[in-house]
Image (spheres, rainbow, N blue to C red):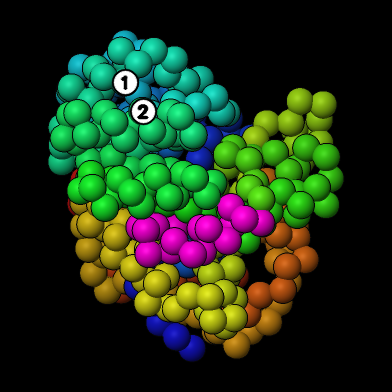
C-alpha cells in the first residue's frame, strides 16, 4: 500500500441541475471517491447555467444534500453578467469562460464580454477558460493587459503548450491543466472507438501533440479529468455530444505511467494536490488521505464505473494501481468498492 493526500480534480461536469440523467452530485462524487479524488470543482454549463448568486446557491444546495466528497462550484461567464458574477465571487470556485464552441449554453462570442469579466472579476479568484488556438492567444493577451491571473483548461496541442511556456517565461500569471485523455490517447486511438464515442472537446491530438505535452510536463500545473459524462445512447446517436467520463480513471492511468517511468508519484501529488490547492485557494482537508495498492493489475471497464455514463474511452486498458480506501476528516468514506458515508458528507470548499 502507498498513501497519497486526498487528490483534487479541478475540472468535472456533474450535470446537475438540468441533466441528472447523465450524472448528478451523488453519482459524480461517488465516482470521484472511487478514483481517489476527495475534492471536485464542478463546471457551470448546466441547464440553466450558473450565472448569478441565485443559480449558484441553488446548485450548492443540491450538492449539500447529495455530495459524498468535498466540492466547489464555478460561476459561468455570460455575455451580460460580469458585475453580478463578481458580486458572488467569494462563493465560487472560480469564473469559467467558454471562448470556443463546446457542449453547453455558455459560449462567449464577443470580446467586449471577455473584457468586462476581466475588469470586474477579483484577482484572488482564478479566471478559467476553455480557450483553443487563436482564442488562447487572445486570452493570454487580456491577462497581460489586465494583470489578472488566468488558468487554461485541457491544453491539447503542441503549439498551445509552447505558447503557454513562452507566456510563463515572459512573466505572465498563467497556469494550465492537461487531461488524461489528451496525455494517453491520440486521434488514431479515437478512430478505433465506435463512431461518436471519440468526440471530445478539445478533440484528441496527433502523436506529436501528445509527445509535446509529455515533453512539457514541467509547464503543466494541474492534471484534471474534464469528466464530461453522456449516455451511450447519446454518444452513439447521429449527433453525439463531445465529452468523456474520466474522474475515476485519472489516478489509475497516472499510476500506470509511474510504473512505466513517465512521471513520478511526486508529480501526481504536485499536479493533483499541491498546485490545485494553491491556485484555487482550497483549504486543507485535515486527516484526509487515499490508500492505493500499486501492485494490483486490472483492466478498466466501463460497466464497473460508478458514473452513470457506464462507458470509457479506456475500455480494456490494463493498469496497475487501485484505490482501496479513502479517508476524509478521519472518516473512511470509501472502502474496497463501497461508499461508506451518507449523501451530504461532502463540504463546500467556500464554506469550510
Q: In this picture, which residue range is highlighted in magenta?
A: 207-223
Q: Position of residue 165 (x, y in %)?
A: 36, 52
> Mark 1 near mark 2, Cβ–Cβ under 8 Å?
yes
- Relative to 38, 256 lies left or right: right
- Relative to 45, 113 lies left or right: left
Residue 306 visible in rendering: no
Can you tell which mark lies on residue 114? 1
Examine the image and state in which quarter residue 49 appears.
top left
Q: CA distance from mark 1 to mark 2?
A: 10 Å
Dot 1: few (<14), some (14–19), or many (≥20) neighbours within 10 Å?
A: many
What residue is disc 2 on? Answer: 138
Task: Verify whether residue 135 appears in magenta.
Answer: no
Look at the picture and state if 212 lies above or below 2: above
Q: Position of residue 33 (x, y in %)?
A: 49, 62
Look at the picture and state if 237 lies above or below 179: above
> Which residue is nearer to you in this view: 312 or 179?
179
Query: Element at badge 2?
Result: helix
Amino acid at each position: 500500500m502507498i498513501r497519497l493526500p486526498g487528490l483534487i480534480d479541478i475540472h468535472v461536469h456533474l450535470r446537475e441541475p438540468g441533466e441528472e440523467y447523465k450524472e448528478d452530485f451523488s453519482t459524480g462524487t461517488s465516482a470521484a471517491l472511487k478514483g481517489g479524488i476527495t475534492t471536485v470543482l464542478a463546471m457551470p454549463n448546466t441547464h440553466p447555467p450558473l450565472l448569478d448568486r441565485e443559480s449558484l446557491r441553488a446548485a450548492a444546495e443540491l450538492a449539500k444534500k447529495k455530495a459524498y466528497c468535498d466540492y466547489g462550484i464555478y460561476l459561468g461567464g455570460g455575455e451580460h453578467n460580469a458585475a453580478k458574477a463578481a458580486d458572488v465571487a467569494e462563493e465560487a470556485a472560480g469564473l469559467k469562460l467558454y471562448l470556443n464552441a463546446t457542449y453547453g449554453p455558455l459560449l462567449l462570442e464577443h470580446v467586449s464580454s471577455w473584457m468586462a469579466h476581466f475588469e470586474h472579476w477579483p484577482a484572488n479568484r482564478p479566471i478559467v477558460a476553455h480557450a483553443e488556438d487563436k482564442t488562447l492567444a487572445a486570452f493570454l493577451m487580456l491577462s497581460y493587459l489586465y494583470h489578472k491571473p488566468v488558468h487554461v483548461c485541457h491544453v491539447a496541442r503542441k503549439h498551445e503548450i509552447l505558447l503557454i511556456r513562452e507566456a510563463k517565461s515572459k512573466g505572465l500569471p498563467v497556469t494550465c491543466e492537461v487531461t488524461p485523455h489528451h496525455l494517453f490517447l491520440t486521434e488514431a486511438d479515437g478512430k478505433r472507438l465506435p463512431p461518436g464515442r471519440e468526440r471530445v472537446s478539445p478533440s484528441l491530438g496527433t502523436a506529436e501533440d501528445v509527445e509535446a505535452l509529455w515533453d512539457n510536463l514541467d509547464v503543466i500545473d494541474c492534471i484534471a479529468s474534464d469528466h464530461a459524462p453522456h449516455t451511450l445512447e447519446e454518444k452513439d446517436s447521429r449527433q453525439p455530444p463531445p465529452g468523456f467520463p474520466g474522474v475515476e480513471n485519472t489516478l489509475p492511468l497516472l499510476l500506470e505511467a509511474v510504473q512505466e517511468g513517465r512521471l513520478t508519484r511526486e508529480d501526481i501529488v504536485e499536479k493533483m494536490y499541491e498546485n490545485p490547492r494553491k491556485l484555487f485557494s482550497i483549504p486543507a482537508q485535515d486527516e484526509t488521505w487515499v490508500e492505493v495498492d500499486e501492485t494490483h493489475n486490472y483492466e478498466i471497464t466501463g460497466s464497473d464505473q460508478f458514473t452513470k455514463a457506464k462507458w470509457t474511452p479506456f475500455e480494456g486498458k490494463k493498469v496497475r494501481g487501485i484505490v482501496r480506501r479513502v479517508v476524509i476528516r478521519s472518516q473512511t468514506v470509501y472502502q474496497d468498492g463501497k461508499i461508506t458515508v451518507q449523501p451530504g458528507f461532502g463540504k463546500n470548499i467556500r464554506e469550510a
